[in-house]
Image: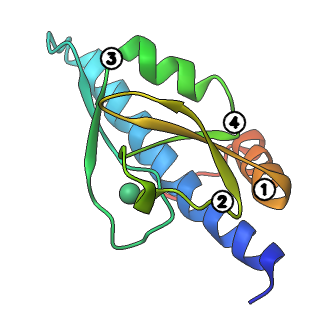
């Protein structure tokens, strides 16, 4: 698989998790959850990963404000150095930013508002 294809595939996988997390975020808001942190799924490209990370609504919103940024579990295994860079390291989560083809694809998917669910 070429680097470009790999980047696109990773971006699509992560776009799907992003949509799952937006639903979780909406549900938490609607239900008026009093929990300080919401639970979100790790948005890394490992299809076998189903770890949860905890973010406040404000933290989640800050990551979502940028189409090329994704939240992942705070361990190197959940990042893909060839297509993304870790731009923020927190105790509960890390933020990665897509570069090159993967970043462009992530932005494209977010703009199109693709709805795979
Ligand atoms: Zn992960």
Q: Give the x, y percent position of residue 86.
A: 59, 42
Asked if the residue under mark 1 is in contact with the one under mark 2, i.e. CB atoms within 8 Å, the reply is: yes
Q: Secondary structure at mark 1?
A: helix
The Cα atoms of the two marked residues, 3 and 1, are separated by: 27 Å
- Give the mark, 3 or 4, whose residue is nearer the N terminus: 3
CA distance separating discs 2 and 4: 11 Å
Q: Which residue is mark 3?
A: 56
Neighbour tally class for label 2: few under 14, some 14-19, many 20 plus, Cα within 10 Å: many
Does any atom of ligand 1 lie closer than 8 Å to the CB of label 2? no
Residue drawn at point x = 20 percent, y = 18 percent:
31
Depth order, front residue of 81/10: 81
Using a 10 Å C-alpha cutoff, classify the residue at mark 3 as few (fewer than 14 neighbours), some (14 to 19) or many (20 or more): some
Residue 55, image quadrant: top left
Q: What residue is pinned by disc 4?
A: 67
User: Where residue 91 appears, x then y in whole percent?
Assistant: 31, 29
Q: Which mark is residue 11?
A: 2
Count of picture labels: 4
Query: Which one is earlier in the sequence, the residue at label 3 or at label 1?
Result: 3
Give the image location of residue 73, x and y in percent.
36, 46
Q: Secondary structure at mark 4?
A: loop
In the rendered view, does 109 fall on the left or right side of 30?
right
**Do residues under tags 3 and 4 come within 8 Å of each other at their CB atoms?**
no
- The circle on residue 105 is 1
Q: Earlier in the sequence, mark 2 or mark 1?
A: 2
């Amino acid at each position: 698989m070429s680097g470009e294809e790999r980047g696109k595939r990773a971006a699509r996988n992560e776009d799907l998790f992003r949509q799952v997390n937006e639903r979780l975020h909406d549900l938490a808001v609607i239900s008026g959850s009093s929990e300080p942190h919401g639970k979100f799924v790790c948005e890394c490209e490992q299809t076998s990963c189903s770890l949860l990370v905890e973010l406040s609504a404000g933290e989640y919103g800050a990551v979502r404000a940028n189409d090329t940024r994704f939240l992942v579990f705070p361990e190197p295994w959940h990042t893909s150095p060839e297509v993304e860079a870790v731009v923020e390291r927190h105790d509960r989560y890390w933020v990665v930013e897509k570069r090159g083809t993967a970043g462009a694809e992530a932005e494209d998917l977010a703009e199109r508002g693709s709805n795979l669910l």
